[in-house]
Amino acid sequence: KAGVTQTPRYLIKTRGQQVTLSCSPISGHRSVSWYQQTPGQGLQFLFEYFSETQRNKGNFPGRFSGRQFSNSRSEMNVSTLELGDSALYLCASSADRLKEQYFGPGTRLTVT
Amino acid sequence: DQQVKQNSPSLSVQEGRISILNCDYTNSMFDYFLWYKKYPAEGPTFLISISSIKDKNEDGRFTVFLNKSAKHLSLHIVPSQPGDSAVYFCAALPSFSSARQLTFGSGTQLTVLP
C-alpha cells in the first residue's frame, strides 16, 4: 500500500500571503489529521477530518483552516502568513476503529 | 502546560545494548499511547502502541511498558542498532473513541554508537 503523500514538499512564501497544502491518505483511511512542528513548540495538533467533516480542532487561530474531499484527500490553508508560521506541516491518516496514525513526509513552509 | 513529558533530550547507547526511553504524562484522560521515530526532514514513523488496559506490549526488538499509577511509560529497544539513531517521540490519545488528537512529548534524541 502506498503511504501518506504530501505536496508540495517545500514552499517559500512571503508574509501576508496565503498557502494551501495537500495530503493524500493511505488508501482506505478516512481520518486525516494535520500537525505543525516547530523548534519552539514541538509537534502540535491542528485539526482532524473524517468523512469530510472536521471532527477535532487544536488551539490554532482561525487563519488555519482545512477541508476534506469525498476521496479522503485533505487540504489545509493558512491565510495572512506570519513569520511564526514557518514550520514543518505534517499530515497523518488512520483507519476506522484503529488509533495508530501514519504520517506523510511533511511540507516544509518557510515564510520570509 | 506540558501534558506529555520526555525529560531526557538525549541518550547515547552502545550498539547491542538496551536503550530505554522514558515518558511521563499528567492527563488522566489519556488511555492510548504511541511511540514514533523521526529522522530529520521526514515524517514520524509509527513504532509501537499500548492501550491503558495493558501494561506491556512487544513487537520484535521494541517493548513498551505502561505504569498507569505512576503515569509513566517507557520504550525498550533490545538490541540497539546504529540505524535506531533518531528522535523518539511518545504521544498520547484521550479516551473518547473518535479522538485522533495526538499530544506529543518533546522527543529524545537517541544515538547508538557502533
Image (cartoon, rainbow, N blue to C red):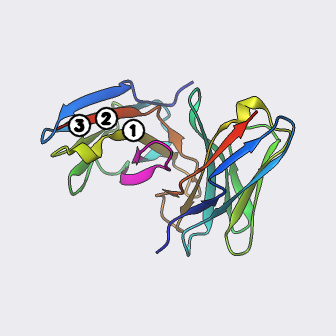
Q: Is residue A60 above or below residue A72?
A: above
What is the C-alpha distance between the residues marked 1 and 3? 12 Å
- A49 left or right of B51 in image: right
Q: Secondary structure at mark 2?
A: strand
Q: Which residue is mark 3?
A: B112
Q: Residues within 10 Å of mark 3 (few under 14, many from 20)?
A: many
**Dominant secondary structure (helix, strand or loop) of the stretch shown in magenta:** strand
Q: Residues within 10 Å of mark 2 (few under 14, many from 20)?
A: many
- Lower sequence index among marks 1 and 2: 1
Mark 1 in CB contact with mark 2 (< 8 angstroms): yes
B47 or A83, which is in the foreground? Answer: A83
> Does residue A59 belong to the magenta stretch?
no
Q: Residue at x 75, y 30 (%)?
A: A83
Magenta residues span B34-50
Residue B110 badge:
2
Q: Residue at x 20, y 52 (%)?
A: B61
Q: Going by the picture, which residue comes out furthest to the left?
A: B16
- A88 left or right of B93 in image: right
Q: Which residue is mark 1?
A: B87
Q: Secondary structure at mark 3?
A: strand
A94 or B37, which is in the foreground? Answer: B37
What's under tag 3, amino acid-wise? Val
Mark 3 in CB contact with mark 2 (< 8 angstroms): yes
What is the C-alpha distance between the residues marked 1 and 2? 6 Å
Percent across and percent down for residue A47 are: 68, 49
Q: Residue at x 82, y 41 (%)?
A: A62
Percent across and percent down for residue B1 are: 57, 24
What's under tag 2, amino acid-wise? Leu
Q: Is residue A96 above or below residue B67?
A: below
Q: Is residue B99 above or below residue A70?
A: above
Visible residue check, residue B71: no
